[in-house]
Amino acid sequence: MSGDGVEGVDGGVPGGREAARERVRGLFAAVRAEGRAVLTATEAEQVAAAYGIPTPAQALAGDADEAVELAEGIGYPVVLKVVSPDVVHKTDAGGVVAGVTGADGVRAAHARVLAAVREHAPAARIEGVQVQRMVPGGVEVLIGAVTDPTFGKVVAFGLGGVLVEALGDLTFRLAPVTPDEAGSMLDSVRAAEVLRGVRGAAPPDRAALRELIVAVSELAADFPELAEIDLNPVFAAPDGATAADVRLLLGEPAGRTAPVHTPEEILASMRRLMEPRSVAVVGASDQPGKIGNSVLRNLVDGGFEGEIHPVNPKAGQVLDRKAYASVCDVPAEIDVAVFAIPAALVPAALEEAGRKGVPNAVLIPSGFAETGEVELQERTVEIARRHGIRLLGPNIYGYYAPWQKLCATFCTPYDVPGGVALTSQSGGIGMAVLGYARSTGTGVSAIVGLGNKSDVDEDDLLTWFAQDAHTRCVAMHIEDLKDGRAFVRAARETVRRKPVVVLKAGRTAAGSRAAGSHTGALAGDDAVYDDVLRQAGVIRAPGLHEMLEYARALPVLPAPRGENVVVITGAGGSGVLLSDALVEAGLSLMEMPDDLDAAFRALIPPFGAAGNPVDITGGEPPATYEAAIRLGLEDDRVHALVLGYWHTVVTPPMVFAELTSRVVAEARGRGIDKPVVASLAGDTEVERACAHLFENGIAAYPYTTEKPAAVLGAKYRWARAAGLLP
Amino acid sequence: MSGDGVEGVDGGVPGGREAARERVRGLFAAVRAEGRAVLTATEAEQVAAAYGIPTPAQALAGDADEAVELAEGIGYPVVLKVVSPDVVHKTDAGGVVAGVTGADGVRAAHARVLAAVREHAPAARIEGVQVQRMVPGGVEVLIGAVTDPTFGKVVAFGLGGVLVEALGDLTFRLAPVTPDEAGSMLDSVRAAEVLRGVRGAAPPDRAALRELIVAVSELAADFPELAEIDLNPVFAAPDGATAADVRLLLGEPAGRTAPVHTPEEILASMRRLMEPRSVAVVGASDQPGKIGNSVLRNLVDGGFEGEIHPVNPKAGQVLDRKAYASVCDVPAEIDVAVFAIPAALVPAALEEAGRKGVPNAVLIPSGFAETGEVELQERTVEIARRHGIRLLGPNIYGYYAPWQKLCATFCTPYDVPGGVALTSQSGGIGMAVLGYARSTGTGVSAIVGLGNKSDVDEDDLLTWFAQDAHTRCVAMHIEDLKDGRAFVRAARETVRRKPVVVLKAGRTAAGSRAAGSHTGALAGDDAVYDDVLRQAGVIRAPGLHEMLEYARALPVLPAPRGENVVVITGAGGSGVLLSDALVEAGLSLMEMPDDLDAAFRALIPPFGAAGNPVDITGGEPPATYEAAIRLGLEDDRVHALVLGYWHTVVTPPMVFAELTSRVVAEARGRGIDKPVVASLAGDTEVERACAHLFENGIAAYPYTTEKPAAVLGAKYRWARAAGLLP
């Protein structure tokens, strides 16, 4: 990955990166010494110069005469701008006059600027008026950087000017960025076309823009205390880019206090959590309805093959097993202690677990930070750190590991092993995951509750799931990230091997408010989340339903090896809707080569439509579906198939399901492994047909053309991020 | 409605509308006489003047000297533009120089324009150079009009300039528009904020823009032969708007040939189609597997209480009923003749139906235009017209009217009467409708196949459904509209009384291509469809699945009476996701009044979160859910409730479903009828709970927070369009 550290591209910085840093450090110290946070234009331009950011010739004029003198030296036309520590938005205050020519012009503009600012902000201290060479033009863009509460320093790029400000067309990346990442930003704004030249105009200098973005990102990364950088507008001409205005704002450097574990340390404790040989239940109980009873029963009934040790102050027997008064009394190593006791009792019991050397504590009880008991949670975390215990929770339903026959939870058990690992921050969402999985028969490698995330969080789990052979896809419900950078690091590493789906709650302003009141966590700006998750190669699910659908389908579908999607449909109407949905999902319908088109035409009635979609028409027998599907599978130029089935008496649903499963299995037997998805239109028999198809590795859905397209689109997004497609 | 005719706003047209029309008519005739389609700038400005469209002072210069003379008269700065019938995009050709001052400047610019155009298009005939007063500035917008293949003349508005061109931010309305509709266009572009003034600048003159849009729309409506109008850029200043460039293009006037029925005529025949007293089956057969056998059996087994008359050339008995050799032999009036015979036999049988005076023919067979047999279809339509028979189809599955116990189809029967009328152009989609309805128990007032739409189409059906007491919502799958204006008229009329949901297939370029190959119909530009359907108050479903979900839920939900939505949730995590989904669906979470907030707080644990969402927390008993829901229902300031349920042993799913159904029913009994939707997170028991809730008028969904928000959003979109909300 491109690094979170201070290494970067030094080329653009005159005198070397370290010298630049030193100059800027001195400048910031001087500003701080004056008790200021906002740099003046002159100071900001010195910082820009240190980082090789081109700005137009400029100087500060104390009065109108001096302004004329400076303007004559700089050359017309010029721009006059007020310089005041109290005026942040100069244009809004009337403090900017552009396109000024001649001595009289300068005098008039000088008077205009001062009068306007005095009216707008009578108390503002005015240090003078900046006289700046007017940049000859080009596309106006904005380059900036902010400190995001989740991800730290992020660099921003967008087209400038009032119009695009109104459209909010900005894109973000973690700072610092590589030149390649900077280049990707130019293509990520909605108005990207403008940066490739429009209506015959020469395009702006993209290399200069990339360099500028890199420089800004490095400046941001070098100085944690630099709260905001704003280059707006930058004029991007065909032969270079110039920052006409540079605004810098100092703040408090964001501190990091979370302890950092190495990947090896994380894997060592996660292995004992996810593949334990012995589990203790602290608070195990004989009394039905008690959480400690449900957890123990789920462990026993689920068939967990390791040791199970009930812990209960009364010792004796619990559910016919020997119970111990304390974990310390258990005469064996313990990999996981599941806590099913009231919150107030957790610290003392955790001390005992620490003395016993238990590496993992699963804290089911609520009554910690989420109910205002912040101090209790902090005390618990402190005990765990002292003993080197990793904590899952508190305030969770527990976790499931079906391949281990492990149900360490007080909720209903689940025992269908499979390819997807699901995590949820909220218990309610965890229950929805469970119900959906059971209803659809989704095979699961893990379901993990994260709750308050006092310690173990998404990046720990990703580190495990990335190398877990059972896990073919990870799907996570996230309300906030404690350490966005650590998540991105872990996600990038995982995405190289398997898809990561994220449902980020709190997308909207209203949503963010609710997240705040639910977890006490500060929800980050969604635009930043969106871009950074994409940068990490994560598939973002638009909602809970989609997350669950992706989680079910992605492990079933093989990875595509190219972008050519072919639709084969028995219902022309479905073909049109499938085409709509595929384009919506970012997929490309293959331009049909003539020979393949002819081959399809040979299979279908003369009034059917070849091209793509291939419309085999509604009244066809099973043999036509079979021949068309086989043709699509066997042609090397086709990379994915989308099937549209229409219920008829000639080809009933189960006949279609069985023939499709057989043809796909035959192809897979010969090493042809392409993703196949299907939309089934028909009476309720199609539901059973879809279940049959899913069991045979074909993601099939009744009464919808959108879902098959959406899951195929998600698989493609991952394949592109993982570098699997040309 | 604002009218499709030529009446409009006359105020802005100097000398009256008719005089203006006369002047423009003469001008167009002169252009036509020269064999031209594109008007010169001078001609275009004369047309603009006739319609009160302000343009800057300008004149045509034959040479550089004349250009200087004209510029001195007009006043500096000026813009020079090439005038050539062969150069359509002047800027691209280098044919425009702006900001020219002084005689030398004019000479230089004149030379530059000519040189650039000669290089760009050496063969172009150059008629001179236009010298135009440079408009002092303002926001650049575009106002235009085009002839849409589906909707005829539509007027377009968007922000101008290269940037917004790259963003494609345009909005469309049927021409002509009223000033109110024109005003709505200013708010419909993404960059609408710019038109309200940004960064302290005075906003552009919105009244002037409205007038300009109205004038352009009237010009477009007055002249069917005017293929394109382009005012780009229009400079919208705080004190007026000026069209700096006017481009007009003549084409062929679009003809209309479809016969027009009055609403009374449509209702008369539709009543006999949808509530028939007698149905004949032409091609009725004893042979299982034959379409004529399935249709007759469905009619008989479905329990249709009117007369059923088998028609078969062999006469005798069919399914133990007396059969007739011809419809003419049937000794009673026939309301509907269902044709279940091969396409080639249809014309002769239709002649007989005509002689018999049958008002409706349902043409099930395929083998008409969709298989290339265009002539056969035209002949069939001609026969029907001659006899005054309305045709449904051909190439359809038939139709269902469950309130009449009528299954006039060869597909599987359906017998759950209810509130939604569903139509589909494609048979495959019709089968998906059937399966979904059966699987979810959706109550249906009609399911109608439209197929090739040789005669009866969506606007006929809307005219019926609008006044049909059983129908509470109409949902239509549409691939093309034969007459977009007639559809809009009927939809507007219907929307005043009940929601109309449309799934428009062929949204994307790829989709449109497939539509073209499927129906041979020219699919319209989707941006125009989208705006015009919204203008008509139609709820556009993004996909098949959503159309079906809306169709199921909208008839169940009462209409909201205000915009205040309150979320009550047992799972904080669901609350966040519900908030996201509600904002996404265009809904507003109510700002909680202090007294109501206090009232909710009194019901929930101290660590629960009031505000909105109201988080009652996960461990609460049924009484807490009940009290919170009752509070939300009884407070007049709350207009809709969204419930988030979390499966616990304390409040199991069916307990929640029953208590919620009871509380809502009690409130309805006292006249409190608010829409209530619910998201249930839990194990599979929540599925049965959702079904129970749906049966009791609460749109409830398992494992999703998006669907309840989406259906509530759809109901609100309708309520706003129907003018039910303040």
Image (tube, coloured by chain):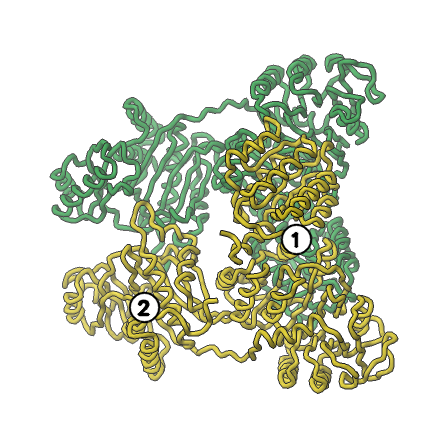
Chain colours: A yellow, B green
Residue identifier under label 2: A12
Task: Name the residue: 74% across, 74% down.
Answer: A277
Q: Earlier in the sequence, mark 2 or mark 1?
A: 2
Left or right of B700 on screen, residue B53: left
- Label 2 sits on what residue type? Gly
Of residue A476 and residue B87, the one placed in the foreground of this image is A476
Q: Quadrant of residue B662?
A: bottom right
Q: Is residue A518 visible?
A: no
User: Alpha carbon of mark 2 to alpha carbon of mark 1: how far?
Assistant: 48 Å
Task: Name the residue: 63% across, 86% down.
Answer: A386
Q: Percent position (x, y) of residue A614?
A: 58, 35
Task: Name the residue: 53% across, 68% down.
Answer: A489
Left or right of B178 on screen, residue B499: right
Q: Quadrant of residue A554?
A: bottom right
Instruction: Give the answer, above or below, for where B80 lies relative to A235.
Output: above
Subunit ID for the residue under disc 2: A
Label 2 environment density (alpha carbons within 10 Å; few <14, some 14–19, many ≥20): some
For residue A556, which numbered disc appears in the image?
1
Q: Are marks 2 and 1 in contact (CB under 8 Å)?
A: no
Q: Percent position (x, y) of residue A723?
A: 51, 57
Instruction: For mark 2, give the secondary structure.
Output: loop
Of residue B566 and residue A689, the one placed in the foreground of this image is A689
How many labels sit on residues?
2
Left or right of B89 on screen, residue B471: right
Of residue A462 and residue B325, the one placed in the foreground of this image is A462
